[in-house]
């Protein structure tokens, strides 16, 4: 099955998968980079975005309403969680932060399971994006093609927000040195709240735009969380460009390996992560000392 | 007594013969009939007698509430809960399977403890260890993954506590990983292959090309091998690709891309639980379905409900139970009615399998008259035929596998469904005995009783 048509198909496949991983990872990495909190509830927030969007879709029948609902609901959840819980953990050991976000993730997942059950829920793509499209070398689901565009636009928006706005400049400064930002008279805790909200929103947005591809269930974020961590480690903790690069690399590794032996797809992903950790411990685009 | 019967010693000839026969018989007795222990005379083993000394006996179930098999696990748990309720109430349905059950089992209330295994073997074993330590469970159950079933099999043998599998279709469970303390109610993957294979060949002919999707653990590998062996040896089918994916895969795009480029005519999907739902939904997204014909060798509870009947219409599958068997078997009707009354939906085969596994255990314990595990095992090994929700069945003593029919179903079109749960049409109920390979075909060696 190793032929050019399949190789190109898998490369393209990896691009789509990688773009999605990049979006989710970018949320995780800016939260960690700015707040120093490794958010183990990030997968649950991905899931919450899917469910909020599904609910909105059920009531409105509009995919666009679903996307807005998914993203905004999870941003609100992120802000509330940061205000009520996370901010009490900024000065506590990393172990405590891991435990509290891990626990939050369980609470979110089980709450959704309690209210909506374990059966998966499907969110259909908008009618113009249903079906398959011929790319010449392969047929590809039209919505997945659109997903590549949607995610690219979302990543671009995040980039512009981080690199072309004043608030983005403060966030990036916070990633480099939060104490210095605080010393300059900027209310760093408000920035933290905003960053947590934006990071969560990225996960929520990814959760709902991915729902037409992978139907949602309470555990949908669990596997994504693991892959997202690998992406962040490969790209460099706290680096937005690193998350994008790491996502694309991870997507390609998973897809191309599967062409030779699908059983080794995820093995190769972890091999790549190990290699990066050995050769460049702070990730491909990470900065030494940023943790 | 006549005079001729008297011996010189004053003992009658008949008396002497009886005495001699008694002595010879007595000498042989240990070999053929075990001594009848009074309660308290049995040597301790596993959690016996501590687990059955009070007025309640505990059963431990490590069942997935989370993860890829959560939906199936929840259904399965309901089957066990209903069975426990029926045992404790002496329900007429249960008494038809286990006539010696009164209210409770041997005068004791049965209590079911359950914990989330997430379909992970290590987690399941740890939970069972906790149940043993804290609650002295007399029976273990709970698998929706054969990896868990195999792990609990070995754990049961080590701890000398009975284990009845939940859902487990791997050939290894009562094959190379069989144990004296483990029993399986649902059939081998090999049996499913032998049942559905002829149907596929009859329907689709010879020399076809098939792509397989296989979950990467014991169930997936053994079922894929059994189905492929049958189709290739008997009808010249070719496996053009086998896409092996880890349990819990969410995005099957890379696997489906390989399948789309494989030239296959059939997609034989061995994935199970949520993996099956997602891989089938995504195969549709990629246009693989309906271009290729989907086959599900081992049916998955709730598959049609989750994917929608449009995707399962015309799909052939082998299954343990489908609720419309109520038209054929009176016990099936009683079971479906009782389940529906309690849970407000019609049971899938996981729930049926769970109910039957406990009902059979209750039959064996009440038949043995004790919870002493070796005696209960011997009761199973008698191989008695007894009624079930799919007709008469019996256990094979050599591999502790239930010999039971396999139900072949085909997915209904939405327009043919008579109600919202009428997803499958029962095509055939294939008798189990002719489908079964020899007990030692997969290397079963049961091990010791004590």
Image (spheres, rainbow, N blue to C red):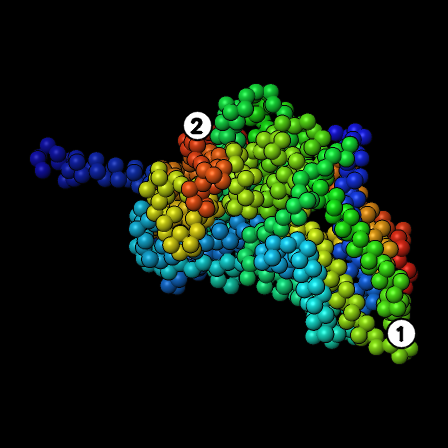
Q: Classify mark 2: helix, strand or loop.
A: helix
Q: Position of residue B291 (x, y in %)?
A: 62, 31
Q: Which quarter of the image is occupied by the N terminus of chain A? A: top right
**Of the numbered discs in the image, which one, if any, rests on residue A86?**
none
Instruction: Report the front residue among A178 and A267.
Output: A178
Instruction: Report the front residue among B106 and B288.
Output: B288
Q: Quadrant of residue A16?
A: top right
- In the image, what residue occupies the spot 80% across and 74% down? A190
Count up the numbered dots.
Answer: 2
Q: Classify mark 1: helix, strand or loop.
A: helix
- In the image, what residue occupies the spot 34% across and 47% down? B334
Residue carrying label 1: A181
Residue carrying label 2: B434
Q: Chain of mark 1?
A: A
In front of the other: label 2 or label 1?
1
Q: CA distance from mark 2 to mark 1?
A: 78 Å
């Amino acid at each position: 099955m190793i032929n050019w048509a399949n190789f190109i198909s898998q490369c393209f496949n990896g691009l789509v998968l990688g773009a999605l991983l990049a979006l989710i990872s970018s949320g995780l990495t800016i939260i960690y980079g700015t707040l120093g909190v490794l958010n183990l509830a990030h997968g649950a927030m991905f899931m919450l975005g899917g469910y909020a969007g599904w609910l909105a879709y059920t009531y409105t029948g509009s995919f666009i309403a679903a996307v807005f609902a998914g993203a905004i609901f999870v941003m609100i959840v992120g802000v509330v969680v940061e205000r009520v819980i996370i901010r009490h953990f900024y000065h506590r050991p990393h172990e405590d932060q891991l435990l509290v976000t891990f626990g939050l993730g369980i609470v979110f997942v089980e709450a959704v399971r309690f209210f909506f059950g374990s059966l998966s829920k499907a969110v259909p793509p908008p009618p113009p994006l249903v079906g398959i499209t011929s790319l010449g070398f392969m047929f590809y689901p039209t919505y997945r093609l659109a997903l590549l565009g949607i995610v690219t636009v979302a990543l671009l928006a995040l980039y512009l927000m981080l690199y072309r706005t004043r608030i983005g400049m403060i966030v990036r400064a916070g990633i480099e040195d939060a104490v210095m930002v605080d010393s300059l008279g900027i209310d760093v805790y408000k920035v933290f709240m905003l960053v947590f909200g934006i990071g969560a929103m990225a996960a929520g947005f990814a959760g709902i735009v991915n729902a037409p591809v992978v139907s949602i269930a309470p555990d949908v974020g669990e596997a994504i969380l693991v892959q997202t961590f690998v992406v962040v480690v490969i790209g460099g903790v706290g680096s937005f460009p690193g998350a994008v690069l790491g996502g694309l690399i991870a997507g390609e590794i998973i897809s191309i390996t599967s062409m030779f032996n699908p059983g080794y797809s995820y093995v190769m992903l972890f091999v790549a992560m190990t290699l990066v950790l050995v050769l460049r411990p702070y990730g491909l685009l990470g900065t030494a000392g940023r943790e | 007594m006549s005079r001729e019967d008297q011996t010189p010693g004053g003992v009658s000839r008949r008396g002497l013969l009886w005495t001699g026969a008694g002595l010879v018989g007595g000498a042989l007795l240990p070999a053929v009939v075990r001594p009848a222990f009074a309660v308290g005379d049995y040597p301790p083993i596993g959690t016996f007698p501590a687990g059955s000394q009070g007025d309640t006996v505990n059963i431990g179930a490590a069942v997935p509430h989370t993860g890829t098999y959560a939906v199936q696990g929840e259904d399965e748990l309901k089957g066990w809960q209903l069975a426990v309720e029926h045992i404790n109430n002496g329900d007429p349905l249960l008494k038809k399977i286990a006539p010696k059950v009164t209210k409770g089992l041997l005068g004791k209330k049965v209590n079911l403890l359950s914990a989330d295994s997430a379909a992970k073997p290590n987690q399941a074993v740890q939970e069972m260890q906790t149940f043993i330590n804290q609650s002295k469970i007399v029976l273990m159950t709970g698998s929706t993954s054969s990896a868990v079933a195999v792990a609990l099999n070995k754990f049961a043998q080590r701890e000398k506590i009975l284990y009845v599998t939940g859902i487990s279709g791997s050939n290894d469970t009562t094959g190379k990983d069989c144990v004296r303390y483990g029993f399986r109610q649902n059939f081998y993957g090999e049996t499913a292959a032998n049942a559905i294979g002829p149907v596929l060949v009859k329907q689709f002919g010879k020399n076809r090309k098939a792509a397989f999707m296989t979950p990467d653990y014991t169930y997936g590998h053994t079922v894929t091998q059994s189905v492929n062996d049958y189709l290739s040896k008997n009808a010249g089918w070719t496996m053009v690709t086998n896409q092996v994916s880890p349990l819990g895969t969410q995005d099957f795009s890379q696997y489906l891309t390989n399948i789309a480029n494989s030239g296959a005519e059939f997609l034989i999907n061995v994935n199970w639980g949520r993996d099956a739902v997602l891989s089938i939904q995504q195969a549709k997204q990629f246009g693989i379905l309906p271009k290729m014909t989907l086959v599900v060798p081992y049916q998955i509870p709730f598959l049609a409900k989750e994917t929608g009947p449009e995707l399962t219409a015309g799909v052939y599958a082998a299954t343990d139970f489908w609720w419309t068997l109520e038209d054929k078997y009176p016990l099936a009707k009683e079971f479906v009615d009782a389940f529906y009354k309690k849970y407000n939906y019609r049971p899938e085969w996981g729930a049926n399998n769970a109910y039957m596994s406990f009902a059979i255990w209750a039959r064996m314990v009440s038949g043995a008259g004790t919870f002493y595990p070796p005696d209960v095992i011997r009761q199973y090994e008698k191989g008695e035929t007894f009624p079930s929700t799919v007709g008469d069945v019996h256990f094979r003593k050599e591999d502790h596998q239930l010999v039971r029919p396999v139900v072949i179903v085909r997915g209904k079109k939405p327009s043919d469904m008579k109600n919202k749960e009428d997803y499958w049409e029962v095509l055939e109920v294939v008798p189990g005995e002719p489908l079964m390979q020899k007990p030692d075909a997969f290397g079963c060696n049961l091990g010791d009783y004590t």
